[in-house]
Amino acid sequence: MDTKAWTLPPPLREWLSVIPETGLYASENEFVAEAIRTLLAARPDVRLALACKLYEHGAISLGKAAELSGLDVEAMKEALHRHGVSRAAPEDLAETEAMAEAALKAARR
């Protein structure tokens, strides 16, 4: 797991430091991870921006970007275009199959 340090304003540092004492979370990391997941669930615009950037950096496939954003593959292609992200062609059969599976999964929603 990668680690990253950041600086929080004093009130947030204090709040975060006592989270494990509440018994609701085993660690500060567990709390932060859930907070991020909750934010992403509540903010489709943030999910879409994140999916576009991860795709642009080559970290995820088009199918994974669609899944993360909550869009179908065609809508994800359009979103990438709107965000100025060039699409790469699938590199191999496995990626093409993964994209097809993601499209089918999205269609069943």
Image: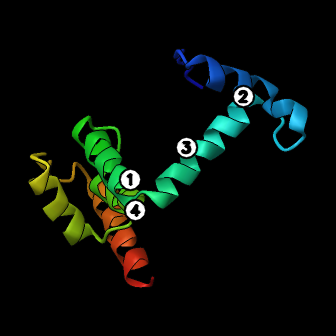
Q: Which amino acid does label 2 sit on?
A: Trp
Q: From the viewer's perspective, is the residue at label 4 or at label 2 nearer?
A: 2
Residue at the image position 65 percent from the left and 45 percent from the top: 34
- Tell me which numbered mark, 1 or 3, is placed earlier along the sequence: 3
Quadrant assignment for the N terminus: top right
Residue 36: mark in rendering? 3
| Chain-order first, disc 4 or disc 3 | 3
Say what secondary structure mark 3 lies in: helix
Circle 1: residue type = Arg
As drawn, the label of residue 67 is 4
Residue 47 — which label? 1
Residue that carries the numbered disc 2 in the rendered image:
15
Q: Which of marks 4 and 2 is nearer the N terminus?
A: 2
Q: How far apart are marks 1 and 2 (CA)?
A: 26 Å
At 26% across and 47% down in the image, what residue appears?
52
Q: Distance between the residues labelled 3 and 2?
A: 16 Å
Q: Do the residues labelled 1 and 3 touch (CB within 8 Å)?
A: no
Closest to the observer, 3 or 87: 3
- Which label lies toward us, 4 or 3? 3
- Residue 66 location, x and y as percent? 33, 61
How far is the residue under mark 4 from the one under mark 1? 10 Å
SS state under label 1: helix
Residue kind at label 3, given as amino acid type: Ile
Q: Return the mark for residue 29.
A: none
Distance, label 4 to label 3, CA atoms, is 17 Å
The residue under the point 52% across, 17% down is 6
